[in-house]
DNA sequence: CTAAGAAAGTTGAAAACTTAACCAGTATGG
DNA sequence: CCATACTGGTTAAGTTTTCAACTTTCTTAG
């Protein structure tokens, strides 16, 4: 066990520091940029993510809980969010046969149209500000490094 | 110029998709986790980031504007934020000699103490959930890939 | 020198988010 | 069965964030 100071803290080395900051900076700047690129369409990142999830789901619908965990939001937040999107005509709530407590969030026709219209711009944005700046080997390495981290975080979630 | 569909959109390949999702997932899950680990100390990520910036600055002080851009927040948001931290005793405002419009946010003694107390836990958290999950070569590669992206985003910021 | 515009910050109201309490329906264990 | 606990989801109250308007000071073109 290595330690750098008398109190036992293992501070980050130069190299670690640089990698960490790079990840942090990209993560934040990128979110900002994507948000800005969605703005002209009247969508937030959050809206878009929900549209994506519903679009990719069977029957364009998802149980509220599942959607909440998929998008990493609290039930409460999602509930508000869906209410707003419902008012905007992008989704509607539909209740669930098999479990009468449950609700589905369902993509409306308009929501689907919106998705089809916006997605190309979004993917262009992702390319311009991320993917196309990385080489093939970068992408492979990135995935190789980050997938385990994501896995770790997913399983850690909720514990301690 | 490659295109995959009739409307000219270059969708992401499998590999691109995976890398992008991995980055996205890590970025969001990690922020959540760090936030949670700061919670016992009564700090948010935002609070902590401001403390870091001030701690690393000459005289433990920074102009509001500079702090706002450094932390990627609007002036308004920072103003509210600093007010809260001022009420919490972590920072104080001090006005600037050379430009009478300007203000400094200054770390208080208590703010500095807090920083000293919390930093070791935070770095441990960063290690546990990110750095220590990556090998030396991962770190190098990560930095090599992401630093240019960060650079691109920093210069792009504000344009278009 | 001065009027017009830009920059630094603040403010207050509206929108979004969090937290905790809550209701209704479902599972379960005695 | 039926009391108890759990799940899915909403709601209310409090906090944070955004948005637009505003004040004060600085800069600069004329």
Image (cartoon, coloured by chain):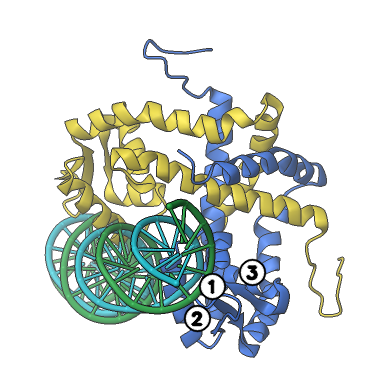
Chain colours: A yellow, B blue, C cyan, D green
Using residue A151 as the reference point, say whether residue A123 is left or right of it.
left
How far apart are labels 3 and 2 at the CA level?
Answer: 14 Å
Whether residues under marks 1 and 2 lie with C-beta atoms below 8 angstroms apart, the answer is: yes
Examine the rendering and report whether any part of residue A160 can be seen: no
Q: Which residue is mark 1?
A: B47
Relative to B118, residue A120 above or below? above
Query: Which numbered marker is on residue B53?
Result: 3
Query: Which numbered marker is on residue B55?
Result: none
Q: Residues within 10 Å of mark 3 (few under 14, many from 20)?
A: some
Q: Residue at x 69, y 54 (%)?
A: A20
Using residue B19 as the reference point, say whether residue C6 is left or right of it.
left
Q: Residue furthest top?
A: B6
Callout 1 and callout 2 share a chain: yes
Q: Nearer the viewer, residue C18 or B116?
A: B116
Assign a secondary structure to mark 3.
helix
Residue A70, given in percent of the width and then of the height, sits at: 40, 47
The quadrant holding residue B107 is: bottom right
Residue B133, given in percent of the width and then of the height, sits at: 71, 51
Q: Which residue is mark 2?
A: B85
Q: Residue at x 37, y 42 (%)?
A: A49
The quadrant holding residue B118 is: bottom right
Q: Residue at x 18, y 32 (%)?
A: A110
**Label 1 lies in what chain?**
B
């Amino acid at each position: 066990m290595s330690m750098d100071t008398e109190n036992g803290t293992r501070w980050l080395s130069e190299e670690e520091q640089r990698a960490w900051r790079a990840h942090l900076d990209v993560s934040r700047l990128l979110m900002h940029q994507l948000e800005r690129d969605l703005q002209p369409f009247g969508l937030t990142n959050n809206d878009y993510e929900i549209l994506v999830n519903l679009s990719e789901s069977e029957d364009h619908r998802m149980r509220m809980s599942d959607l909440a965990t998929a998008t990493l939001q609290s039930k409460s937040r999602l509930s508000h969010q869906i209410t707003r999107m419902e008012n905007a005509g992008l989704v509607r709530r539909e209740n669930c046969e098999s479990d009468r407590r449950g609700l589905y969030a369902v993509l409306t026709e308009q929501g689907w149209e919106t998705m089809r219209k916006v997605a190309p711009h979004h993917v262009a944005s992702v390319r311009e500000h991320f993917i196309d700046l990385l080489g093939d080997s970068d992408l492979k390495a990135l995935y190789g490094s980050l997938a385990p981290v994501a896995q770790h975080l997913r399983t850690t979630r909720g514990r301690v």
